[in-house]
Image (spheres, rainbow, N blue to C red):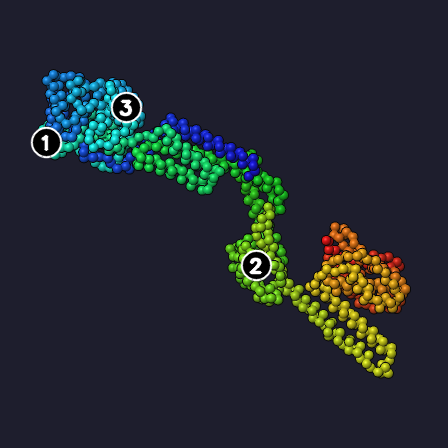
Amino acid sequence: MCPRRHLRLRTQWWLILFATSLLVTLMTVDRTAERFDNAIYDHLLQLAPSPRSDAILLVEIDDESIGRLGRWPWNRSVHAALIDRLNAAGAKAIGYDVLFTEPAGEEDDERLARAIAGASPVFLPALPSGALNEGGAGSAILPIDRFRDAAAGIGVATIAPDPDGVVRGAAASHGAPGRPGHLMAEMARSLPHSGHVPSDARLIPFGGGEGRWPEVSAAAILAGQVPAALIEGKIVLVGVTAPGLGSRYATPTGGVMTGLEIQAYLLQGLRSNAMMTRAGLTACLVIALLPLCMLMMGLGPFRRLPALACLGLCSALVLGASVCALMLLRVWLPPSAALTGLALAYPVWGWRQLAAAERFMRAQLERLEEEPALVPRTAFIRREGGVAYTISLLRNAIARNREMRHFVAGRLDQLPDATIVADLAGTILLTNLAARRLFADQPEALAETAGLGPILNRCRVTGSGDMLRFCPGMAPPSACEVQFDQGRYFLFGMAPQTSTDGAHVGWVVRFVDISEAKAAQKQRDDVVQLLTHDMRSPQASILAVLETAPADRIAPQESRSIRYYAERTLQLADGFVQLARAENLEYALEETDLGDMLMDAIDDLWPQSRAKSIDIVTQAEERLVATVERSLMTRALVNVIGNAIKYSEEGTTITCSLSSQVRGDGVLCAVYAIQDQGPGIAPALRQTIFERFRRGPVGLGPRESGAGLGLNFAHTVMVRHHGRIECRSETGHGATFLLQLPLIVD
């Protein structure tokens, strides 16, 4: 991806992080997702253990009590009798959730005041006269003076549901002068063996589980039907539960409870220090923003996990932190804002990544579409833009790739040599028809999942007999001649394949069948053997007989003819042998001074030049060095200079020069120029003079012998040395042979 696209994607990453962080912050401050937070909180409370305790007893003013003791409100003497009964049974404390804010009869009020004062600690409720402040306290209408003086504590017993109608908490703060706190907080603070009562506790620990608080009817207590042991040592909460008189509320655990039961949960939570608080704004922002930043970092600059795994990990972190804080620290961390941020950031960032990938892919596909196709085809491209356009480009690219694979496979099958394409590890990717025929007896070796090992193990290097081996990461076997187990011979080659950026991506293995060439080579070797031994030996024997036979046995003319034909046959055989060596010999190259080599050739031809009184003039630059096979190169010079002597008149001059010049292809070369004063060579003959058995014009002197192999030998040697040989001549004006050899450059 180009730097511009990368910068654009990075900018979008920052924008998404900023926008989602801002949204999460607003949701946290404004409690926008409180409904979802409450649902999660309610579910977690059902998993928590129940805080119920046998230390609290509920005395209900229920339908039975109303039916037996009369309509509500009761005479205060009845309340006094109930308090006396509870005190007599040994109640530890009494929370009497009935309002006594106005006086009744003097005698009844006095009796109730005496009962309150003489009993265990009795706590009475006050009637809130306005909205409670943030601390849970506010102005309230207190019980009348005599009750207030007799009671152990006064507090409001208000239960305030959340906006969804579910009771989850209470303002359980302590009171202040002139402003009573919550009744249950006053009781918990005053009772012995109570834990520390936090002033900021808000959430009631309802808990899950089955069962209810121990409860009895007020009428049963007044009738003496309740054993004293059930009341002794208990904290007694008295309240109205009769339908139509007492309130009922929905709770997080899924049920409906009376106000008295909720007060019991609140008191138990305060006494056991199990009350829960909502986390402050700072903690809520941290738990909301930290996972979001972690997700965006994981999706962007520091991506180490798959995107979905990163999302799951961050979501688990949010939920885990919320659960652990609630269960272990008794602090409620609302997770909805954080989860909302994660749920928004993940798809939005994925959308922008997909958009960037789509733009990049479209640009690359358009570039590919503009490139000339090796296999012409008509493609339908939808030009209206959008995803349909990209899909059309992609469809066409896939089709082009398939066509290209088909084209490559087809052209590969047309190759005459067995060819195998493999990857870096040696796994076979493609084979051609010749390869499948070659390994027809072992088709599993060419399967696309097979490697090169089984194939190479069938090949043994000619001469050494070593088996070819290939291991990934190691240098491949060098090109060599191998023999298969069927007795066939092949030239083995293994070439590396690179990608467009130069990276090594695989191998191309080729087997060139040289079985017929090997057979032809054997035939040539047999011919050379025939020439070098089977034909030379009889001719040498003939010459030996002529040398040793008495002069009167063979006539001089016949002797000269026999000697001439025997020597010519030997020359022909020697020419064939030298030509075979030049064509097939593995050259032993060495650095050679070309001037010295020219002088060696001239020295070898001194008898022939002396016999015809021909002067050989040399003009050579000093220290021209080339890498050559000295014996063959000297022989080539001997052949060229010898031809010049052969076809020159007696008493003429042959000029042999050696100079350096730059060839047309930029290579610095040494140039031998052999110039004679012979009859010259016709233009038609110059085109074929370097072919076998082609001879120049007959000299002006005696008939010259020759087989027409000397110049062909010189041409072969020059080509094997990456040099050139050419002839320049005009009929009647002699000939000049130019031999070019690449020089060693210091």
Task: Please state which amino acid type lies under the numbered disc 3.
Answer: Gly
* Residue 545 point in image, percent of width and height: 80, 80
Q: Residue 495 got which mark?
A: none
Between the C-alphas of marks 2 and 3, the distance is: 91 Å
Mark in front: 1 vs 2 = 1
Q: Compared with residue 455, is residue 178 higher up or lower down, i.e. above or below?
A: above
Between the C-alphas of marks 3 and 1, the distance is: 39 Å
439 vs 16, left or right, is right
Q: How many marks?
A: 3
Q: Residue 225 got which mark?
A: 1
27 vs 728, left or right, is left
**Residue at image location 87% in from the left, 77% down from the top:** 557
Element at badge 3?
Answer: loop
Task: Please state which amino acid type lies under the numbered disc 1.
Answer: Gln
Report the residue that reaches farthest toward the right: 651
Element at badge 2?
Answer: helix
Label 3 sits on residue: 136
Q: Are marks 3 and 1 in contact (CB under 8 Å)?
A: no
Element at badge 1?
Answer: loop
Which is more N-terminal, label 2 or label 1? 1
Residue 364: quadrant of the picture: top right
Task: Please state which amino acid type lies under the numbered disc 2.
Answer: Arg
Label 2 sits on residue: 436
